Image (spheres, grey):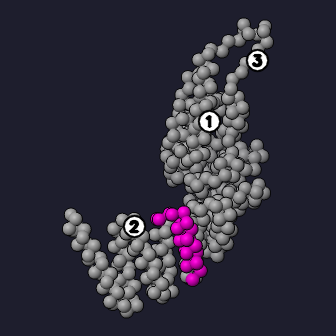
Amino acid sequence: MWKGESNPTSKNTVPLPPSAEYLKARKRAKITHNFSPSSQAEVFVPQYQNDHFLKATKMLDQGIQQQHAGELPAAIKSLQESLGLFQAIGDTQKQGMVLSYLALSAYTLGDYKSAISYSQQCLSLGKETTDLRLQMQVFSHLGNSYRHLGDCNQALKFLQQCLTIARQLQDRRSEMAALNNLGLVYKALGNLTQAIQLKQQSLEIVRELQDYWGEEQVLKNLGNAWYALGNYTEAIAYYQQSVIIARALNNHRSAIQVFKNLGNACCALGDYAQAIIYYDQRLQLAKEIKDKRSQEQSLGSLRVACEALGDFARAILYYEEHLELARELKDRQSEEQALANLRAACYALGDYAKAMQYQEGAGSREQGAGSRE
């Protein structure tokens, strides 16, 4: 994820690159001791420590691979085993590294309290965690987790520390991520002007780095900030840039979300015709990746926009597709809602006969459900 790869569960945050200590450790995964004949009698490393170190390093690598594959519960299990082994041999430096990855896995799972606990354990190692990149990672995990828990003051404190280290190291990628994540906190605080300024700085850096995954995320966040500010025209401009990159990267999940935001922004401006275009693009993409829930939501948005234009005939087509999907999903509540909406739309068109058909359809299904009971 630190090389600009997709991170669909990032919750609008931008991930930081790994610590330098981890990259060095991977090169030292195999322990070799090249002693001179005269020094062999003076230096002795117990075999069990070698075995523990090799297994701990192997479990760390396995945990990180599982994390990248999205197998987060398995990643946490592997990382916890690695942590226990490093604790057994007293390697506090590696413990800090593992705790940072445990914090990231917990954060991605939405377990923010555990992410904070792992991060605090890492910091408690004190002088042993001298790797500034590792500290920067931990401050990032803490800040992002506190934001999700609603403690914005703590979030600001830790993310500012993260930004300070990034600038100290002249690490532009980490600086970009910290600026974006700080912007999210200011947005949560309602300070939208400051949020936009920070995200704009982040955007300049991410474009300098030619990190298209990061750019797509930052553009989306800028769109969200302008939307919250009520400037829907600016929001649309950033969303349009974001969705172009998302489509180019085949980041379908993000594109589906941004098409929804684009449609909503157009509705807020009263441009329902353009909103329908965006909602329909969302619907087609949802069908392409077989995302039934996004299809259902898109159909709901489409019929609302059609009704706003007074196009009840077209709205009925979307209602009927919604009804079919609800039955496919065996979602009785959604099905009943679709039938009620169809009846209302038919009445609005003056088609009382068709409205009665949907009334009879609802009644027959209720009777069928009663007989099954």
Gap between marks 1 and 3 measured at Cα:
25 Å
Q: Residue at x 70, y 49 (%)?
A: 3
Name the residue carrying label 3: 34
Q: Which is more foreground, mark 1 or mark 2?
A: 2
Residue 130 on image: x %, y %:
69, 33
Q: Nearer the viewer, residue 174 or 76?
A: 76
Q: Which residues are magenta?
A: 273-293
Quadrant of image for the C terminus: bottom left
Q: Residues within 10 Å of mark 1 (few under 14, many from 20)?
A: many
Residue 133 screen position, x and y as percent: 69, 40
The residue sitting at 67% across, 60% down in the picture is: 249
Amino acid at pointer 2: Glu
Say if residue 42 shows up in the picture: yes
Which of the 4 quarters of the picture holds residue 119?
top right
Task: Name the disc covering residue 81, or none.
Answer: none
The earlier-in-sequence mark between 3 and 2 is: 3
In the rendered view, tell whether residue 367 sits above or below residue 18. Answer: below
Disc ID at residue 61:
1
Query: In what element is the residue under mark 3?
Result: loop
Q: Is residue 369 left or right of residue 277?
A: left
**First of labels 1, 3 by sequence position:** 3
Mark 2, residue position: 328
Q: Is residue 152 left or right of residue 234?
A: left
Asked if the residues shown at circle 1 and circle 2 are in contact, with their CB atoms under 8 angstroms apart, the answer is no
